[in-house]
Amino acid sequence: MVADEGLRAGVRSYETRSLDESRVVIAQHYYDLRLGVRGRSEDFLTRLGVADLGALTVGDVSFGTEVTIGFAQPRVYHVTVPLTGRFRCRQGHGAPSCTVPERAVLLRPERGIEVDDWSADCRALTVKIDMAALHERLGALLGGPVRRPPSFETYIDVGQGAGRSWVDLALWCLREKNASNGLLGRPLIRSRIEQTLLEGLLLACGHSYRGALEAPVPTARPATVRRVMEAIEERPDEHYDAARLASLSQIGVRALQEAFRKHVGMSPTAYVTEVRLRRAHEQLLAADPTTITVTEVAYRWGFAHLGRFAQRYRMRFGTSPGQTLRSG
């Protein structure tokens, strides 16, 4: 077996002609499974690339010949997108689901999955999703806990729109194994990608809460917005994402975004950036350039990309961070 690991990005790739090794590496990241060869055994070659994103496992797999697959696991969802070729699967005792490159399937492995027609040219994007994490993100978007689990449609249109965007983002994660010191290796970015993939799936597929997600959100009171702004002003160096800000406001993510747009003129995350820029500006003005650098100040206030920090800083204050530091 040939194995390769992307530098600090949590992206791994494997290649093996052994059926037993294939079962082992797939079980490490996905499920214990039954894997059988239906086609020419001499053509069997498992290629697997996989990225661990916490609540999601994103992978890209092919076998080089026709295979059969069987697996089961509770408390997860599983999305499979054929990038080339085709496959046919059955969930529990339900009718077979057949798919092609522009149509993905969303499955519940706890019911047992049987794949009996995986074509020799099939290469698929496979995403395992923690059920509790997806339900939590749904609750955050809706502004309250989900009391009844969502019922999902089997097929997802990935040929256009939100479905296509979701697939492209998942595939980007796998390409990061070729990026030395890439963005996916940074915990802050990885957590944001994880959250975006969870929320993106809820907006890309059909389910019983889709109407509620697309319904107009009620406008929050200015006092709610002030509470979030005060928390950010008091602790601007803490980690804030959409879910954290929504929990501070005690309303849903969409309602908070609409309230900030109406009362502040920007999104909650944009306000976090604004506060951090002001704090960085104040520190640069007061600092001694012989004892501190612009890089240290940028990292202190959560700006990991120095070029983007400098660009935003110049747009906000009309000068560069270095000039501000030297003038102080």
Image (spheres, helix red, strand yellow):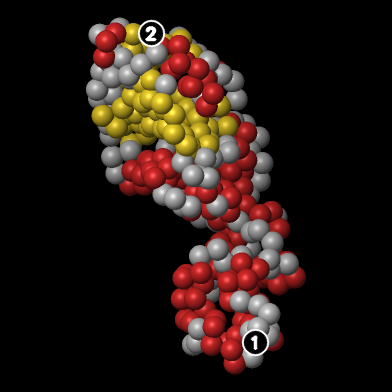
User: Toward the viewer: 261 or 5?
Assistant: 5
Q: Are marks 1 and 2 in contact (CB under 8 Å)?
A: no
- Locate the N terminus and report the quarter of the image it occupies: top left
From mark 1 to mark 2, how far is it between C-alphas?
67 Å
Rendered position, 174 above or below 304:
above
Q: Which residue is located at x 44 percent, y 34 percent?
A: 4
Q: Residues within 10 Å of mark 1 (few under 14, many from 20)?
A: some
Q: Which residue is mark 1?
A: 285
Q: Which residue is located at x 38 percent, y 25 percent?
A: 15
Q: Which residue is mark 2?
A: 36
Q: Looking at the picture, how far across and down is residue 126, in whole percent?
A: 42, 30
Pick out the residue farthest to the right.
234
* Amino acid carrying mark 2 in the image: Gly
Q: Looking at the picture, how far across and down is residue 43, in whole percent?
A: 26, 14
Image quarter of residue 166: top left
Asked if residue 54 shows in the view, the reply is: yes
Q: Earlier in the sequence, mark 1 or mark 2?
A: 2
How many numbered marks does the figure carry? 2
**Secondary element at image label 2:** strand
